[in-house]
Amino acid sequence: MLKKVIILLLCLVSMCGCGNTSKESKEDMLKRILEEDNYVILDVRTEEEYEEGHVVGSMNVPYDEIDDTIDIDTDKTVLVYCRSGRRSAIALEMLTDLGFEVMDLGAFDDLDLEKE
């Protein structure tokens, strides 16, 4: 009987996390960040890729040049992207380790932001 009660309690506890509706979707989070207007858009592709086209207002710092001397205000959220999402994921980890709040936007071609 005790085993059944424990199993029932474990099932109930595990079900509580399944319907978590308080998590903000990535789209909603991006919309909120853009509305707050306290962000920097960082393109971590090569300079050549950046010159072929980039998000309006973005700055270009190739991911392999990111270090603790990067000139970005730590009070701003860093929105990071690259060509496919691989380098932006690496940059996210590096920037997070440096103390930045970072959101990985993924691949340039998938972005619904103004480009030039």
Image: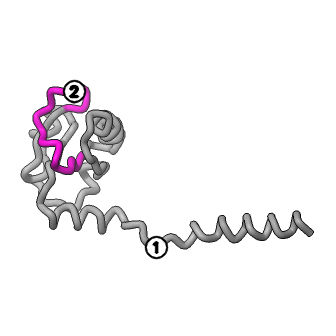
Where residue 49 appears, as percent x and y from the top left, is 17, 37
Image quadrant occupied by the N terminus: bottom right
Looking at the magenta stretch, what is its main secondary structure?
A: loop
Which residue occupies the foreground of this view, 21 or 53?
A: 21
Mark 2 residue crowding within 10 angstroms, few (<14) / some (14–19) / many (20+): few
Question: Going 88% across and 63% down the picture, which residue do you hit?
Answer: 3
Question: Callout 1, which amino acid?
Answer: Thr
Eyeballing the image, is 83 above or below 12? above
Where residue 45 appears, as percent x and y from the top left, is 21, 36
Q: Is residue 18 left or right of residue 37?
A: right
Eyeballing the image, is 10 above or below 101? below
Where residue 22 appears, as percent x and y from the top left, is 42, 71
Question: Going 21% across and 47% down the picture, which residue do you hit?
Answer: 78
> Which residue is farthest front?
2
Where residue 39 appears, as percent x and y from the top left, is 15, 53
Q: Which residues are magenta?
A: 62-80
Question: Going 15% across and 67% down the picture, which residue do you hit?
Answer: 35
Q: Is residue 45 left or right of residue 8?
A: left
Q: Which residue is mark 1?
A: 21
Q: Which residue is mark 2?
A: 67
Which residue occupies the foreground of this view, 104 or 1?
A: 1
Q: Secondary structure at mark 1?
A: loop
N-terminal label among 1 and 2: 1
Q: Quadrant of residue 37?
A: bottom left
Magenta span contains residue 110: no
Mark 1 residue crowding within 10 angstroms, few (<14) / some (14–19) / many (20+): few
Q: What colour scheme governs how the chains and residues are painted in the rendered image of this protein?
A: one colour
Q: Is residue 17 left or right of residue 64?
A: right
